Image (cartoon, rainbow, N blue to C red):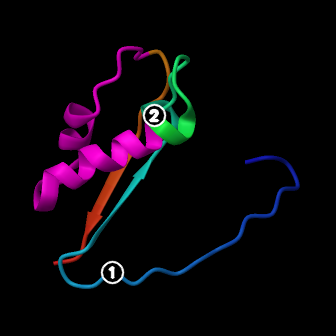
Amino acid sequence: MARGARYASARLTLASGEGLVLYSDGLIERRDEDLTESAQRLATSLSGLGATVTASSVFSAYERADGSDDRTVVVLRRL
């Protein structure tokens, strides 16, 4: 957090069966790729996983060649 920065808060209600994936920038940042393209590729990888999305499956589906940055994933699913 930047000193003195203000962050907006938001609420999200997930319907039964819906999920949310939170990830750090280290998962998708690549020196040779635009960040928007990389985020889209992650979204495509996640959509292919369907209801089986877990933090481990996200790492497997979106393998990074450069593991020097932080990689954090949190997966939530409402049953």
Quadrant of the image containing the C terminus:
bottom left
Image-based side of 79 in relation to 27, left or right: left
Cβ atoms under marks 2 and 1 closer than 8 Å = no
Q: Residue at x 15, y 51 (%)?
A: 49
Q: Residue at x 56, y 31 (%)?
A: 34
Q: Is residue 45 magenta?
A: yes
Q: Which residue is denoted by mark 2 in the rendering?
A: 28
Tag 2: amino acid: Ile
Image-based side of 15 in relation to 30, left or right: left
Residue 72 position within the rendered picture, expressed as x and y whole percent measured from the top left: 41, 39
Q: Is residue 24 above or below residue 70?
A: below
Which corner quadrant of the image does residue 4 belong to? bottom right
Q: Residue at x 36, y 40 (%)?
A: 41
Nearer to the camera, 63 or 32:
32
Residue at the extreme right of the image, as rendered: 4
Q: Residue at x 25, y 43 (%)?
A: 45
The range drawn in magenta is 38-67
Q: Is residue 71 magenta?
A: no
Q: Which residue is denoted by mark 1 in the rendering?
A: 14
Tag 1: amino acid: Leu
Per the picture, the main secondary structure of the magenta-coloured stretch is helix
